[in-house]
Structures are given as C-alpha cells and as structure tokens.
Amino acid sequence: MDSMVQTHPSRAGESADSYLWNAWYVGALASEVGPEELFPRTLLDTSILFYRKQDGTAVAIHDRCPHRFAPLHLGTRNGDQVVCKYHGLQFDCSGQCTHSPHGNGNIPKAAVVKSFPVIERYGFLWIWMGEKEADESLLPDFGYLDNGPDTALAHTYLHVNCHYELISDNVMDLSHVDHLHGEILSTKGTLSPLMAKVRETERAVNARWVWKQTPASLLFSPHMPDPAGETHLFFDITWTPPANIQLSVGATQTKTDAPLTLENTVGQYDLHTVTPESLDTTHYFFATRRNHLLDDAAHNEHMIQILHDTFQNEDGAMLEAVHAEMRTSDFFALNPVLMSNDVAPVKVRRLLKRLKIEEQTD
Amino acid sequence: MDSMVQTHPSRAGESADSYLWNAWYVGALASEVGPEELFPRTLLDTSILFYRKQDGTAVAIHDRCPHRFAPLHLGTRNGDQVVCKYHGLQFDCSGQCTHSPHGNGNIPKAAVVKSFPVIERYGFLWIWMGEKEADESLLPDFGYLDNGPDTALAHTYLHVNCHYELISDNVMDLSHVDHLHGEILSTKGTLSPLMAKVRETERAVNARWVWKQTPASLLFSPHMPDPAGETHLFFDITWTPPANIQLSVGATQTKTDAPLTLENTVGQYDLHTVTPESLDTTHYFFATRRNHLLDDAAHNEHMIQILHDTFQNEDGAMLEAVHAEMRTSDFFALNPVLMSNDVAPVKVRRLLKRLKIEEQTD
Amino acid sequence: MDSMVQTHPSRAGESADSYLWNAWYVGALASEVGPEELFPRTLLDTSILFYRKQDGTAVAIHDRCPHRFAPLHLGTRNGDQVVCKYHGLQFDCSGQCTHSPHGNGNIPKAAVVKSFPVIERYGFLWIWMGEKEADESLLPDFGYLDNGPDTALAHTYLHVNCHYELISDNVMDLSHVDHLHGEILSTKGTLSPLMAKVRETERAVNARWVWKQTPASLLFSPHMPDPAGETHLFFDITWTPPANIQLSVGATQTKTDAPLTLENTVGQYDLHTVTPESLDTTHYFFATRRNHLLDDAAHNEHMIQILHDTFQNEDGAMLEAVHAEMRTSDFFALNPVLMSNDVAPVKVRRLLKRLKIEEQTD
C-alpha cells in the first residue's frame, strides 16, 4: 500500500470536526471574481473554484477534476461551463460533466464535481459547504451595508497566518485597542476598565460598551462639533456562526438619554467575517458602511486603506505571533489566564464548540 | 530515548514498499557526471554519489560516510577513490574503506559504503539499488537511440515536484496533448476520440494509436511534402518497469498498407524515464532520436529545447498542480473517474503494483 | 476536539527527555542584550525573553503572556517591568503580573509568567531552565576568560541547523582539523595518528593530545622564534554538562619536561558552548582568551573573525550536511562505524545520556 504524502505538514492533524460545515462562509469579495475569471481559493482545506455565469450569477464548484484531479481553474471557460486543461472534460456550474472528448464521448456517471450553493450579498460571495441542504435563513441580515451610497461603503480582504478563532477572540475583546493600536482607535485608557455588557442567545453573542472620553479617537474627533471635547461613544458587536462579527461604533457630543446607536451618533457599521483556509491560515473579509460624509469618495478610500493596514500590520501581526507561539489550535489546552475582558470571546468559543458538536452528532 | 527528527516532513510516511527496488533506474545523464566530478543525487530517498574512475567507468556508492554520515560528495578524489572531507577516510569504488588516518590506521570491518551496480548506456547512467543481484537482462533494449549521428540525438533532464507515477500516467495517456499542449503537438482533436490499442505482457504495457489529421502538428508538417495536407500518423508507446516509457511517433503522406513505423514515416524515437527522488519529487530524464534531418545540429538543439520547455512548463506545471491537489500518493484512494483513455495508464499502475508486491513477498 | 497544529513539523517528535534541563545553558552573549532591549530567543523549544533591569542585571522570563500567549518581546519596557503589547498586562522580572488595565484591575492568581534564573558570567548570560532549584555550583569555572585585558578576549555567536550533540562530537574529536580545515589549524597530518588520552569523571570528559609538527599551523607559527621550525603543541579539551567544551591549545619551541599548558606555551583558552534551539537547530557560542599579543586589538578582531568564519563555513556547513543526511537525532540508531578517534565524543554522548536518565528518574 502506498504511503500518504502530506505536502502541507500542518494539515496532518486536520479532522472533519475542526470546522462548522453547515453554515455560510464568505469565499470571496464579490469584486474579486470578474466576469470571465476562474477564481480559485482554498476554504476549509478544500479547493474551491468561483466563477460567474454569463448572466453574472456567481457559482462555486470543487476545484478538482474528478478524472485526474487537475485544478479546474487552470482550464478555460466555455460559456457557463468550464473545460479542464488536462484532458478536456467539460463541467457545467452544477458540477455535471457535459462533454468528454474521449473515445465515444461516453460520460461516466461519477463524472461529477461537487458544487456549492452561493449567495451574493453585501458585496461578498457566501458559500455553503456542508452536507445538509443550504439554509438561506442562516445567513444573518447585514442589510445596513446595502443602505446608502457606494461612497460610504468599502470592502477589503486580508490573509492571516493564524487559526480563525484567534481573530474572533480579537474582535470580541475590544479592550486590546488601546494597547495594540495607535491614536486612530485609541480610547485613552477609558475602555479597558469597563466591563462589556454581554448577552448570549441560541446562536449569537453580543457585547456592548458605552463610555466617554476626551477627546474621541482620531476616527471620530474630526467629525465632532468640538474635536477636543468630551465625547460619548459606543461599541456594539455581535458574533453569529460560523465566524461573522458585526461591529457598530459611534460617537456623539449631544447629550441623550436614548441608547447610543448608529441613528444618533456619527459612526460606522462594520462586518468582520473570517473563513478558515486551513487550521493555520485564515481569510479575513471586512466591510464597512459610514453614516457620515456619505458622498466623500476620497475619504472613503483613505479610511478603508487605514483600516486595512491596521488590521494587517497590528492585529494580523500580533495574531500571527500568537499562533506561532501557541503551536496548537487547542486554545484551552494551554490553560489561558482568563479575565473579565474575555467573557465575550470565551462565550463565542463555547457556542461555536456546541454548534460543532451538535452538527457532528446530528 | 531520543526523538526522531524528520527534516523532510513528506518523507515521514515513506516505507520500503513505495518503490520497486530490483530494477534499473536512470540516476543521471551520462553528460552530467564529468571525469573529475563527485556528482550527488538523491534517488528513492537515498543519497547516491556518482563518479567516474580514471578509465571513465561510472560508479555509484552511498553518499554517506559510515563513520559520521558526512556526504562523501563534499570530499575529494584520490585516483579512483574518494576521501571523506570530515575525517579523511578513503573509499574505493566498491565502497570498501581503504585508508584511515586515525590511530594505528586500523580499518574497522564495518567501514564499508554500499556500492551500486551502474550501466552506462543510451546516454544515461542506470543504477540498480535493490538487494538482489543486478540483472542486466532487466534493462530494456533502447538501442534505436544508438543508431545514427549525434546531430539527431538529444537528452534532457527535468526535476518535477510530483509523485513519479503521475508522470507515467501522463505519457501513457496521450489524449492530453490537444488540451495541455499547443500547436507543436496538436492532433486537431483527432486523437481523443480514438481508443488506443492496448496490449499487456508480463512486464510491459503497450499502447498504439494510428490516425490521420489535416495538417499534421507543427512537429511534422514542415517535413511533409504537402505541409497543409492530410497526414497519417502513429504513436506507439511501451512502458517497462520500473518507469521507462519508450514512445515512437511518426507521420507520412505516403499511402501504405503496412503498419506505420519509424521505418516508413518521418518521426522520432523517444525515451521518457523517471526516477523518484522522494514520494513527492521526481527526476525526469528524456532522450530522443530523429530519423530525419540527421545532420542538422541547429535543428537538433532547437527541438530538444522546445521539448524540454514543453515538458517543464506544460506537463510539469500540470502534474505539480495535480500532486499538490491530491495530497497523497494513493491515487485510487481518491476514487478517480476513469475513462477509455485511462486503460493504458491504469494497466501500468496495476502492473507496477503487482511487481512491487512480488518483490516484497519474494 | 480540536486538532493539534504543528507549525514546526520537526518538533512533532520532541519530548521532554530530549534535553538535560537542570543545567546552565548560555542563552545569549552578554553584549546581545542591550540596556533597553527586549531580546527574544528560543532555547530548548521554549520562547525566552531576556532583558536587563535598570541596574543592568539580566533577567529571563517566558516570552509568552499567560493571558493570550502574545510574545512579550513585542511589548514595551516600563522600568524593570514589561508590558504586553496585546492587552496591556504588566509583568515584573519575577514573572508576576503587577498590573491589569481590565475591569476592576483584579489580577488573577495564575497571571504569572515563568521566570528563569540567570547568571551573567564570562561574557555570557547563563540560564537555568529546569524544574529543580538553580544550582550555581553546576556552572563550571571558566575564570581564565576573565583574567587579562579585553584586547585578548573575544566572543562570537553562530546559528547552526543541526542537532546540538553533533557539535560536541565535532569538537571532542579534533582529528577532523586536518581534513575539514585549512592551513590555519593544520597539524600536517600529525594529529590523526595519535590516540587522544581520554579521562572521564562523574561529570566531565577530558581529552588531551600532545604532539610536534614542522612547522606549526598558521595560528601559531608567526609567534614562534623559528616560524618554520619544529614545534611542540598540545590540545586539552574538557566537556562538562550540558554542552560546554573548554579547549586549550598552545605551542612552544622551548624544550621542557613539564606538561604543556597555557603557562608554558603561546596559546589560547577557548570555550565552545552550545544550546539547542530545537532538535534540529542549535545556538553556538564561543569565547576565546589569548595569552600573547595581549594589547593588540586589531589582531584580536582579526582572529575572532577568522575563527567565526571557520566554524560557520567549515564546521557548520559540514554539520548541517551531516544532520540533513542523518534525518534523525538518534545517532546510534544509524550504526555508526566508530574508531579510536571517537572515544571522547562517545564518552560524552554516554555521559549526557546517563545524566538525562538520572534527571528523568529522579
């Protein structure tokens, strides 16, 4: 019997139960998959090919010819179909082989590539990779992103060499902002002493901070009536499976008894959502809609670049260092010292674990 | 007890039964091993040192001093012998230690390096790495390569990051040429619909295609009386263990009832032969003799460069992508969808497997 | 359950018994750790942070925050304390967390980083990583290095991709010098035939060679009355655990019945001491004190550069090739052919093994 060859050593210990499968993951920014493109990306250790039909509909199939395992993205488009570069088998977007140039042209029954449901929404291509029937109701409503002009909306993508749960840990505990980040996000030490108010439901974890600081961080102070003055702020973040974190943040100098929301503050509505490439590497997708300076395209471009660079060079660099130091994806096995600021991320880890166990025992 | 250290992770799963051992493999092009050279190459996960005695005879020994495991190719020549760079032990080409500069000069009985039979033939150095006595009769006759002027003969070498059996699969199923390659080898879609005639013997698999196309591929059309006209062609390929594929190809515009051969066509006699470096990496050797334009050295040089680039950039690139996607050397474990064009390569895989099992149970 | 991720494949097989733990290892040259520096280095597969308190005292703590495993060297200094870059926890040099900016500032009892005893001596920072109480008496006396002007003393550091015991093998068997090195260290073939006189005690192995050659190696001949004349020389080397080799070498043209020592020869007192980074990579530290040309700073600089380059390009290159060829750290499992020149290195391997077994069964 032949030996197994592990070209990716870190994948040696992978097992099916490492991921939640029956869920919507972002596979790509909608803008990454051009009309004629064969766009490959590895998700959950599986090679996926995204492309768009001639009517623009995005589709996803396994990026592996079932004949001799050639990556299909090396092939060519033929209308809505894909032709394998190696031996010319042609597949439609349901994964069915529709043409074989070999012999009498007979198409073996097994000549089918797995196809995956895709939803294009909020500027992303969402993919369902589980065995159960795709359940569109499990894609949360991030419709705030859709409401408003393009000049107040931006998306970006990062690749980070860490386990994906380290990224949700990072966003769910915003007490890191004063330590890891510079003035752009600084709370001047006012956030860390606060206990986030954390609420948990069957399929979500929410954390909320409300505080005041003087002045606001550079993200908001220029937009306040008194840039140097006391400012009231809030963070409101909600994790939903498999790995979405919706974060709203806003600032105001107007006194109000109402809870702070994006309705009564200058702020932005962000979506951080990550998809494991492998247990060691993660695709990090981000979208943000601003509720101010709606028509300022230059500001829009400037801000997404700043946020992108912050996530890459500050969060990303730290999380890669943490991942390398941990040398495992089993966070709790390392006996972390947990503190009050860890309530929300730990609730997320436990909820995800429960959902994975439910999926496996279903 | 000390832990094992695997500096080559992919070698972790290697086992002795991954290779057919009692067989002749090409270790090097004859031209790679100069008269004074100590030429190292890893074959079947074993470090081998090739060099030539002063009379030009090529020899091969384990490239590892038995004292402290220094690679012998780092050392120096002393006549027909090799002196280890680390502590000066000297070995003759049978692997016997003949001199120790240490203490009273006593040579321990175990101070022997394994030596390997080598045959220099057809422009290659063939090595026998098995435990059984080397059997020269197991080296197939590729004597056609020897018949004719040097200006119609060429050799080349490639290194490919894939399992060696993927290369025999590739050559045994020539239906890939219209999909993977350009005009130089194109059959204009005429080959794929044909079923190769496949014959199998105890130790060989032969596949043969005969077809016509208009015009011939660029490899032959310039040498036809009517370059744009209908041309009759044949491919005749024979696999022999451990990993030789002899391929003849020819074209003619002369009608004949006789079977097409290199005697009655314009064609060439090729030998593809591969040697595993490891389960993930392969040495690919190639020789070709042309039966036309015999004295055209410039054409000879031009053609071998074209073929080399084709194998490297088209076949090699595809096979490396396939290997990376497979992440295993156990082809059948992935449940490939097999078609009529796979008859010959599958017969080769089964024959090689039978020979390996026979060797292990012998 | 989550899978284990091995980002360092070669560490997969590591086990606690691979190293002698209760011992003093060099962690850094004293000069590597500047007054304000956070200096990280992996020792025995453990991330260590070295830094100096404001009074200059060197300290070492685990380079891993116990909260979320951020490397502490990414953080900042606060007086004698270190502030984690990720969430702002502050640790003193005993590893105790002294400040948390989170919530009510409560510091969990477990918020402690392991700290390690450090001794700064002989130009090195020595670290004790074992579980037993640090025993200063186990740091051998290399006080010769301290006696004399700085212009006759030099230190250097190399990183070598090999198992650490290969380096002690190399230094304990100096018969390699005529084969691996050039004229600078050449014994003109006079050393290899000699049997080193080897003595062993409970915790040390000593080897001694005394010989004559004409002329001396380039290291000494320029300092002899008759540079081309017959010279008497000695090597005296002593291994002590965990991985120190003190080597004295001297030359004289004065006849004497007394044993040759650094008192009656032109020579130098060297300390080779190595610390495993992992089972595949080693930190190599070196110090040397000359007993001649005491005030020649230029000569001093020239000589340490020559020795550094020799160790890196000749010893280091050979040992990396040997390590790669061995693919294991279990030297004896490969059935080495041992000779008279191997007596001292084999005694060292056996003594170290005995000490490791004693430690584990203690």
Image (tube, coloured by chain):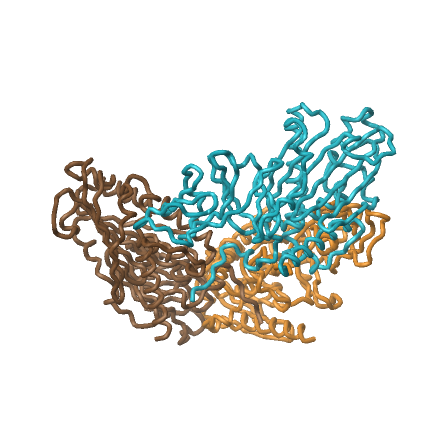
Chain colours: A orange, B cyan, C brown
Question: Residue C26: x and y, percent?
Answer: 31, 59
Q: Nearer the viewer, residue A183 or A239?
A: A239
Q: Number of marks in the image?
A: 0
Residue drawn 80% across the image and 55% down it = A96
Question: Residue A217: x and y, percent?
Answer: 49, 58
Question: Residue A194: x and y, percent?
Answer: 48, 71
Residue C294, by quadrant, is top left
Residue drawn 26% across the image and 51% down it = C287
Q: In this picture, is C289 found above or below A119?
A: above
Q: In this picture, is C172 found above or below B28?
A: below
Mark yes or no: residue C33 visible. no
Q: Quadrant of the C terminus of chain C?
A: bottom left
Question: Residue A202: x and y, percent?
Answer: 64, 75
Residue B151, by quadrant, is top right
Q: Nearer the viewer, residue C246 or B44?
A: B44
Mark yes or no: residue A193 visible. yes
Q: Quadrant of the N terminus of chain C?
A: bottom right
